[in-house]
Structure formats: C-alpha cells, structure tokens
Image (cartoon, rainbow, N blue to C red):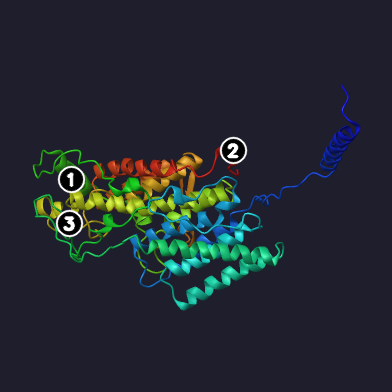
Amino acid sequence: MYLPITKRTRIEKLLLAVLLISLLFSCHKVEIPKPPLPQDESATVVYDWYKFIALVQRPANPQPAVIQNMRNFGFIGVGLYEAVRNGNIGAESLAGSLYQMPAMPQTDTWSQYLWSESANAALASMFKLFLVLTDANKASIDSMEMANYTRFSASTPEDVLQRSQAFGRSIATAIYDWSLTDGFNLSSVGYVPPPVTPGSWVPTPLAYASPVGPFLADSRPFLEYSLTDLAPPLPFPFSEDTSSLFYKAVKEVYDIGIHLTDEQKATANWWADAGGPNVGIPAPHHVLSIITWVQEDQHANLWKAAEVYAKTGIALKDGGINTFRSKYHYNLIRPITYVRRNIDTAWLSYLPTPPYPEYTSGLVGFYAPYIQALIRAYGDIPVNDNAYNWRGLPARKFTSLSALLNEAAVSRIYGGLHYRFTQEISIRFGKDLGNEISNIRLTPLNHLHP
C-alpha cells in the first residue's frame, strides 16, 4: 500500500527533523549545573580557637561559673557543627535530633564556601555572645578572627570568604537566640528543701553555702532522653550502724582522707582545677583540652572534629542536667557531714565540699558522657592529659580513655567528696548518656570524611 505523495513527504520531513534534533543533542549535551563539591579542610582553625579561648578565660576574675560555662560550650559545639556541616556531603542538621531545636540558616546550594572561615566566624561570634568577657577580651577575639580571615584570603576569593563569614555569623546568632529559651537556672531562690532526715544533705563546712542548682533539671536539655533521665537508687540504704554497708563506705573515705599520700593529693588537685585565676583551669577547659588533644592525635578533619565537639558539648550540658536531677532527687548526705557526726568531729575533706547533695557525682556526671562519646568516635585509645603544661607540670599519660575517667572518678574519693559506690554508679550512669548521644547519626558512613 502506498501513501499519497504529499502525505508521505510530510512524514519524511518529520522523521528528518527528529533525526536532526537527535544528532544535535548527541553532539551538545545539556549540562545540568551541579553544586561545588566540598574540599577536605583541616580542623586547625578550630583547635586554635579552643586553645585561644582557654587563654582568654584562664585569668578571669572571678572565674566563670562552672556549670554555666559547661552549658555555654555545649551550645558553642552545636553551633560549630552547624556552621560547617554543609561541607560534608549528606550530613544532617542537629535540628532533626535535638529537643526543640529550630531549623538553622541554610547555605546557597550553588555557591562556594570556605568552611574553615565559616567556623572561624561562628566561633568568634559565639564566644562574644555566650561568654562573660572584658572589652580587651573581645578585641583579642576580633584580632584572632581577622588574622584567620587574612590568612585564608591568600588562597580564597574575597566573595567566597565574605559569604562564608556571613553564614558562620548567622549560625552563631541562631544558636544564641535558641539558647535564650532553655530556662537555665542555677539559683536556689524559691527552693524549699525536703524534710531533713539523718541521711539528708545539709549545707556543709566551712562555708555552709546555700544550695546550687536545685532547678537545673527544669532547664531544657539537648536530648529528649534527658527530660527524665535519673540515676538508679542507692545500692544499699542509709545507715549509721557501724556494721552497715553505708557506714563502711563512709569510713573508707575517712580512712583514705587521714592517710593521703602525696601522689593521692596530686591526683585530687589535678582534677579539682581549683586555685583561682592563672592557677587552676576554668571549666570546661580541662575537658576541652582533652577533647582537642584526642582529635589532633587522631588527625580529624574539620567535619569529624566539628561533629565530636558537638556531641561532647551535648554531653556537658545534659550531663549536668541529669546529674543535678539525681542529686536533688536522692538528696544524699555528704561524707563531711556524716563523718563529723559519727566518726570525727574535727575532720575536713581534703578538697572543699561543694554546696549540693552527694549522689550522683558532679565531676563524673560531666566526664563520663563526654569520654564515652570520644570512645565511640575513636575507640578506647591511649591519651595524654597535658592541661597543665602551661604551669610546667608534665602530662598525665593514660593507657586508655577509660583509665583517664577512672582516675578522675577516684580523685573525688581522695578529695573526701564522694563515696566509692557513688563514683562507680556515676560512671555507668554517664556512659548511658554518652551512648545516647553517640547514637545520633548525622553523616552517612559512606559520605563521612576520614
């Protein structure tokens, strides 16, 4: 069968047009624009900032409030992660994992960023927003930020640096604004202690100070898990009977205290971080020194380092909340009160007893979860603690992160502040929180930079 010539011609022309279009597109493929690929960046700028801010806060007088500063650096760690996470393919915002965290500012998908500059700007801004600083401190932070910016400008276009700087600062502002709604409160104004029993905490010698942090558990945590987390009950009941397990636990603290060796005193002092400006280390800079040492030793890049600073920061804030919830729930008597009532009326603990209940341990409450986060990130690796090298003291070397945690815990027994069972339970309690934090998956394994 033959088509009429005119109809056949039209079909032939249509087929020819299709063929020509096909040939045209085979020679000139349509290129769909792609976002710039992130480049592997060093975490050096971050390490430099954490070391620098320790120098800024060390001579402060008065020293920063311990629990307040822990909380602040928790937010700073989260902000650091948000400032750089877009540079790691597939990385997710912490806004999807943290309790009531709002959406964070977003980058321009089709634009280039230098993530080191985003971190530089974010950290400089957050330090000025969160920390109590003098005008001279703020000027030194500005100088540090500008020195980094100038260094980056030698190899990065100005428009990229300005875009990166603006993004880092926008993250800092968003994190600070979010922090204002967390209800953080260390005051005891309005606190009504429970009825006093023989096993109750009461203000302790020598200062007999009012309680600190009874309402801390009411502040908003980073994890929903931490809204209700509570340490397990005491392993045995309070008793003043000399044959009881409780009496024996107190007697151990007393016996150690009256026979302290020089080595035990040095251990207690190392972890006390006390002594005032340029003598001790304001919290959490001992903690941050260890975290930074581990990350430098493991050659973490910018994205890995930022994620670990964020997770250990979450541990510092929520560790305090969960610990103080437990302290005021159990309201347990301190060793110094029990000993002076039942064993030795003149006894004093080697370290000053802080003004809040004994169980669980404050030091371990902060240390155990962040150490567990480090272990989950890098393994139970050997670690050097060189936090006091600026005073000429040699680093304390540990065969593992767990060994470091165990020494920090026993230091409070040497100091006369805690019973051994408190320290052992506090380690397990804190590690549970550390595991909850470590289970937050932010980066697909096949996308994580080494």
Q: Amino acid at mark 3?
A: Trp
Q: Earlier in the sequence, mark 1 or mark 2?
A: 1
Q: Nearer the viewer, mark 1 or mark 2?
A: 2
* Residue 311 on image: x %, y %: 45, 49
Query: Can residue 84 be seen in the rendering of this structure?
Result: yes
Label placed on residue 142: none
Secondary structure beneath disc 3? loop
Look at the picture and state if 100 lies above or below 225: below
Q: Residue at x 43, y 56 (%)?
A: 102
| Residue 43 placement, left or right of 155 | left
Inter-mark Cα distance, 1 to 2: 54 Å
Residue type highlighted by circle 1: Lys
Which residue is tagged 2? Answer: 446
**Residue extending farthest front:** 4
Secondary structure of the residue carrying tag 2 is helix
Amino acid type, mark 2: Asn
| Residue bearing mark 3 | 347
- Examine the rendered structure and indicate whether residue 173 appears above or below residue 296: below
The quadrant in which the N terminus is found is: top right
3D distance between C-alphas at marks 3 and 2:
58 Å
**Residue underneath mark 1:** 251
